[in-house]
Every structure is written in C-alpha cells, then in structure tokens.
Amino acid sequence: MDDLARYFHLDDADHALIAKKRGDHNRFGFAAQLCTVRYLGTFLDDPLDIPAPVVQTLAKQLGLSVTDSLRAYSLGEQRWQHTAEIRTRYGYVEINEPQVGFRLTRWLYSLCWTGTDRPSVLFERTATWLVMHKVLLSGYSTLERYIARLRSRVEKRLWQSLCRGISLEQQAGLEKLLLIADGNRTSQLDRLRTGPVMISGPSLIQALLRLHSVRQLGIKLPAAHIPTMRLAALARYASTAKVSAILRLPPQRRLATLVAFVHCLEATAQDDALEVLEALLRDLFNAAIRADKKARLRTLKDLDKAAATLAGACQILLDTGFPDIELRTQLFEKIPRDTLAQAVDGVIALIRPADDVYYHELDAKYKTVRRFLPALLEHIRFGSNSDGKPVVAAFDWLRTNITLKKPGNDAPLELADKSWQKHVQGDDDSFDLHAYTFCVLEKLQTALRRRDVFVSPSWRYADPRAGLLKGEEWDATRPLICRTLGLSASPEPTLTAMANELDRTYRAVAARLPDNQAVRFDTIGDKQELVLSPLDKLDEPASLIALRDKVANMLPRVELPELMLEIAARTNFTDAFTHVSERSARATDLHVSLCAVLMAEACNTGLEPLIRGDVTALKRDRLSWVDQNYIRDDTLTEANASLVAAQSRLTLANVWGGGEVASADGMRFVVPVRTVHAGPNPKYYGTGRGVTWYNLLSNQFSGLNDIVVPGTLRDSLILLAVVLEQQTDLQPTQIMTDTGAYSDVVFGLFRLLGYRFCPRLADVGGTRFWRIDPKADYGLLNSISKHQLSLKKITPHWDDMLRLAGSLKLGKVPATGIMRTLQVGDRPTRLAQAIAEFGRIEKTLHTLMYIDDEVMRRSTLTQLNRGEGRHSVARAVFHGKRGELRQHYREGQEDQLGALGLVLNMIVLWNTIYMEAALNQIRMEGYPVSDEDVSRLSPLQHEHINMFGRYSFSVPESVAKGELRPLRDQEGKDN
C-alpha cells in the first residue's frame, strides 16, 4: 500500500499532461508508463504488464473502466512517443551520460571503500540510487559487471595502500610467517594466531612474548586513512584461513592481508595478555583470602582460649565489689600476669583489621609474581585518566627499580592507602619492596576494571572516553541529539518537566494508596517500611488450557534440520552469510551446508553427526570450509535481523506484542576446557569456570541481541551494551530486567537515551524514594520519601550528560567501557554523580508506578518469564557434550552461542507460523477462540521437534515451494 501511494499517485501536473492524450487507452497507457518508470527505473517491454492492484489504482484516479480495450495500447506505436515524452518532460536520462557516470562512480566508489557490502547489496543500493536520480536502469548484467569492476578497483587500491611503506626487510618478515621452520610442525602465523588458554605466570609470559613478536615486525599503517571495516575483514581472513590458502593469494593481496592481520593482532595480543593478567591477579588475591581463612580456622582454638582469659580479666575489672586499690592484686591472683600477657599477645596476633590486605599470605607468593613481573613491566605501557595517574607512576617506578639490588627511595606513595601504608613503610621508615609490589598490583587490578588505566592499541582495554563527541563536532551534533532524545539543550526545561512529573506521580499514587490492597506499611525499629505483597498466580481459564493443548497437538512433528531448511526457504536468511574474503563466493546447496553447521554449533554436537559422504553439501571438507569462512559475528547478526523482521510481520506475533518491549537476562554455561575467557562463580559453576550468555528478548518472542561475558559480570555493566548494539528492525523503548541489573546510574542513562528502564523490584522495602520538594505533602508516602534530590548536582554537568548520551547513541564510545567508568563504587566522578542523581528521579517514578499498577507488575513478570522459557528451549537445543560450552577462545564462544540464538529464533518463527495456521483452521471450523487466550499462548515449545540422532537434510517438495505442512488433527494425530 505504501508503494502504491508513493509511486502510483498522479498529481495535478500529471493529470493535466495525461488529459491531453486522446483515447482512454492512450491516457491509461501514458499513466502506466509514467508510474512504472518512477517505481522500477525503467520502461517495461509490455507497458501494461503490471499487477491488478496497480491497474485498479490508476484507473480509479483517471476515472476509467478496466476493459480489454485498454490492451490496444501495448500494440500501438504511440507508446514509443510517450516514452520519449516522459524522458523529456520528467528529466529521465541514460546511465551512459558522462555527468551521470561520474556522479554514480564517485558515490559507489566511496560506498565500496568505506564498507564491505556483498555484490547483491551493492546492486540493490545502486538501483535505488539510479531510480532516485531519474537514471534509466541498464540491463542486469551490465550493472553487475560495472559493480564488479568498481569493487576490483577498490580492492586494488586497498592492497596498494596497505603495502605502501613496507620495506623489503619487513616484507620478508611477513612472508616468513607462512613458512614452517625445520623441526616445527606449524608456521609462525599459526603460533601467533593461537592465544593463551591457561591462567598462570608462564602463560602470561608467553602472551607477552607473543605481543613482543608482533611488535618486532614493525608494521605501521600508512598515513592515508583506511576504513576499519576493510582492515578487519582482511585480518579476519588471515586469522581463520589455512596457511596454504594464504600462500595461493596473489603477491600484493597476500602482503596486504598479512599487514592488516599484524596490525589488528597487536591489539588482540595485548588484550589477551591483559585478560590473563586480570584473571591471574584475581586468583592471586582470592587465594590469599582463602589461605588466611584456612589459617584462622586452624588457630580458632587458640583464639578461643585467649579470648576466654581476657573475658575473665574483664569480668574482674567490671566487678564493683573490688576496691580500685586492690583491683590489680585481685586480678593477678586469679589470672597470673604471664598468662594474661600471653593471651593479649595471642589475640593481637590472631585478629585481623577490617581493611586487611592479607599481605602475609600474598608475600608467600612473591616468587610467583617475580617470575612474570619483569616481562609485564617491559612490554605493557599504560595510559590513564587523572584517577589512574598514581597507579601508572608507581608502575613506571617498578619498571626502573625492580631489577636493582637496592631500589631507589623515591617510590610514589600516593596510591598506598592506610591499609597498605603500614606494610610498605615500617615505623623506622624502612621500605618493603614486596609489599609495594603487591600494593601496585592490587591498585592496577582495580584501575583496569574501572578503565582508569588503559592501553593502546586495544579492543577491550582502550580508553572508553576517547571517542566522546567534542569541540566543533559536538556543537554541530548537539541539536540533532536533543531532538532525537527529546531533551532540552539547557537543563532547566527537562528538569522542570521531570520534577513536575515526579510530583504528579507522588500525589496520584498517594491518593490511590488506601485502596491498594497489595501495599502495607510495617514498622521496623523506629522506621516505617513499605511492603508490597507478591502477585498471586494468574488463573488459567479452561478455555486457555483447551486452546493451548489443541494448538500444540496440531503442530506437525518435524526434524530440526527440516525446520531450519523450511525457514531458510521462507526468509532467505542464509543470503546473509558471505565468504570472509570472497564476498560473492557461493557453492551448490550452500544453504544446506550453512544450516548443518549452524545446527552443529547450536546443538553442541560438533560436525560429526551431520557428515554424509554421499551428499556434497554435507561432506566433511564442505562443512569445515563453511564453518571457517561463513560463520562469524557480522553474518550471524545480519541473518538474525532477517528472522526478527519475518517474525514481526506475523499477525500472531503482533498479538503478543508490538516489539516496543524487551527483556534482558543471562544464561550460564559451564566451560570445562582451559581458557582465560571464563570466570569462577561457585553458585553457577561449582569448582569450575563458565560464561554468561546475556540476551535481549522482544515481546514478540524474538531474540534481538546477545553478549557473552566471562563468569558472571554484573548485569548493569552489560545491559546498556546489549540494548544499544542490537541491529534489528525492532526498536524497543521499554526494557525489563530482573532485580540485579539496576542502579541509579543505569536508570539515569536509560532515561537520557530515550528508554524506560523497568526492572522487577524484589524488595521494594529496601528501595529509596526520592523527592525534590522537601515541603510537599504526599500523605502516607511521607514516611518513606525523606531522601531529597539536589538538582544542583545535575545542572553544571548537563552538557556533558548530553554529550555522553549522544556519543553512546551514535556508537562513538563502547557502552560496556563507559559503564565501567561510571560504576566505580565509593569514588564516583562528578559526572557519574550527576547521572546517578538524574537516575534517582526516574527510579522513584518507576517504583511509584510499580507499587501502584498491578498490570505493570504482571506484564514485567510475564516478559521475564518469556526469557526463562527461551532459556529452557535453549537448554533442550544445546544438548550435546552435557550442555557444556567447550570453546577455548572468545570468538568461538560468541559464534557458537550466536548460532544457538539464531536457531532459537528459527524455532520460534516456525512455531508461530504453524500456530497461526492452526488457529485459522480451528476458527474456520467454528471453534470459539478468544483474543485474550491467544495472547497467552507461547511459541517456546519443542516437544514436537526432534533434535537428536543422525540427521537428514531434506525437505518435502511442496514445502520447498512455499506451502505449509499438513497440520495434525486436534487430538494430536498425524493426518
């Protein structure tokens, strides 16, 4: 309908021109040719070979009846005169016009240079450009050859740019990476591509030596700007392709590929080394805490004995029956002086201060630290913000003094706080190098986590503030950001509006509070606390239970491979998977191979059960080739976007929700293999390590985005990233999470970015209610709303808050890195304090609405339960290898869980399609179906899908042509 209104509407000028034509067939034919060239960019061989809706639309506008007499236009000569007239009157030109060719080439060249789109996408964008600029489309093959020639020119320019400035010596060093030296089984390139998998001192040293090897190659990019996406694509190919395949590349392309790889590898190698360091320091300090606890358990009896002696002495001191003059005599008669002194010494030796740093336990591990510390100091150079400067200064001092027999007495002591000061400097001003070293490492660990210190180049440990909008760029962008986010350029209008909203909400909730049966006030000590009763389970009417069973019974039984192939036929999601290097490289039945590899990853079985020697698409070498060259983050993201779009077009999915709501939650996977990309958490992983798969789910049941994090990183650190970085057509504005994901800063950032953050509140009694007007009377809420906000904390930093929000919205800065700098506990920056203060307004608004509106609480719970349901299906799909993720490296973990998310979306889409068909059938049969019952159905079911055994990748011919499978009868029997 949109296309009809846009391209086939005739305005007054069109009508005036058409009215001059004689005969209904000429008027209709002229209109058809005019609208066709607007829509398609070319004239049809048969001008009237157009769809019936178009015919009816044009005829209605012209006041004509659709009769066979109109067909005479296709056979007459007048059509050719009309074609020429339309070209002249409306300014249509041929593509071979010099000026047109120049403009098109310049535009398309820039597009090819800055991006890595595959030829089909470039063809579509070029065709759109030609239509917009009134350039008549040439033949398909002509345009295809033109794009291919231009892409070839761009690639040659890229290779030449990368090779420029590379000396013969450097070229020889790069070529040497591909050779296998005598006595070795692998090339140096293979060894450089292999990152660390163990958390140990030797592993850290190896990672640092790997970084040193990369730097020794001395590769620096030319001054001319080379797009990051282009570099990343070349580097990705070199990191996955076999050495023999790289050797077969033309010399210039091979050299450019190696240059891009080495350039990107420096950042990767540095990140890998710092990940090992972080894990090593975490284990080191945690082990010291455990050792102290174990030692204290062993001395518990001694402590009890000494404490009992001192308790007896205190009882004598407190006994008023003894005169003060005789007190000492009586005390020593009952408890000898030596016994008392021994008890005092024992307690002093056994007690620990509240800020204990466990130095004695750490010092026992100094030899371990001393082994890797020189390499760390030599190969890592940190930058810092103002908070991290003391750490960098101390680190630099260690670099100079660690190898000296007598270190200098000028060590920077600013970072040694009270807990470390007594260990670093003795009462006689002596200096303990061991204590100072551990102090520096502990502060470095904290600063790295907060990103107060950073390195360059880096993907994960770079300065998260480096990309913030600033200067003229920010001045030019500010108005657009304010309009987009609905914020004022000055703080007063926005803050006044929010203050009024908070006041109105307080008064409205307070007025309804006496009638709110879910809320009561309990007195605890001298304070009143608000208690919110948990929701009662929502009853399921008999009609819902019957409908759910009937629809579930009608879903066809299907093998998972067939389901995937069917969805591939319906959505063409496999077109999103392109070769890592040869963007147009395809193979016969590639969609079958892709589905097989995706299933192997999602089911965690590996390729073995899917290999078929008699089927070309399922041979071992084909599947390995597809796995290495087609499955990666960008192709998985694009394929997922096509599935989400297909789901959002279904009527049933829109009954469940409009896509404006999404929830985020994490799913845990044990990682039993050696890796640095996993973290400990006894609650979820026992004695081992694991990762959290954090994903975003829309209210249409489609997964929008996911992030893999080691261990159980705090949800609030990654929530913003999983929302901002999703790349589907759906743009949810209301984000629901469980309790653990919220903080004042998160509330503030989400409001600044135009989202409503709606976490489930498990303990409302522990939540602070903030107010702006200290004198406002909010009735029963007065007793719990005693915390006052200060807008003066926000106003001075408003422009910086806008700048941060704009930088995040435009993708200039990484969301996870920014969250690390803002969530810094006891030492927040002024900007973090301002955002937190702003967030308290939003948090209080949410909390008030949450206690007031049962529908809101129930919808939040419903959406979170959908996430849990998706995780249940994910467990059923990810059944191989005991459900454990056995990937050593981050990229492998992300690709495998990305494939799992993709397959889950296929299952949801397939179920929704067939549930909709089943509902349509039973409605036609007269079965009563209520909209409320339909809204409570779920596509998160898998009992009818077989995911086990050896698999056959075939699909019935009728289904391959787009037809639906036959539904089962309403008792669940196959027809």
Image (spheres, rainbow, N blue to C red):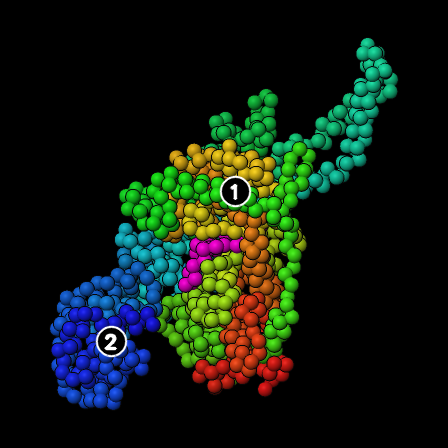
For the image, the number of numbered tags is: 2
Relative vertical location of residue 7 with respect to residue 376 in this rendering, above or below: below
Position of 86 with respect to 726 (left or right) is left
Distance between the alpha carbons at the discs numbered 1 and 2: 56 Å
* Residue under numbered circle 1: 506
533 or 414: which is nearer to us?
A: 533
Number of the label disc, if any, that sits on residue 383: none
Q: Secondary structure at mark 1?
A: helix
Give coordinates of residue 209: x percent, y percent.
Answer: 47, 50
Q: Quarter holding the N terminus?
A: bottom left
Q: Residue at x 55, y 30 (%)?
A: 417
Q: Quadrant of residue 469?
A: top left
Amino acid type of the residue tagged 1 in the rendering: Tyr
> What residue sits 61% from the left and 54% below the top?
689
Residue corresponding to mark 2: 61
Which region of the structure is painted magenta? 719-744
Residue 651 rendering spot, x and y as whole percentages: 47, 71
Say above or below: 946 vs 672.
Answer: below
Q: Which residue is rendered at x = 87% and y = 17% of the image?
A: 333
Q: Which callout, 1 or 2, points at the residue further toward the start of the chain? A: 2
Secondary structure category for the residue under label 2: helix
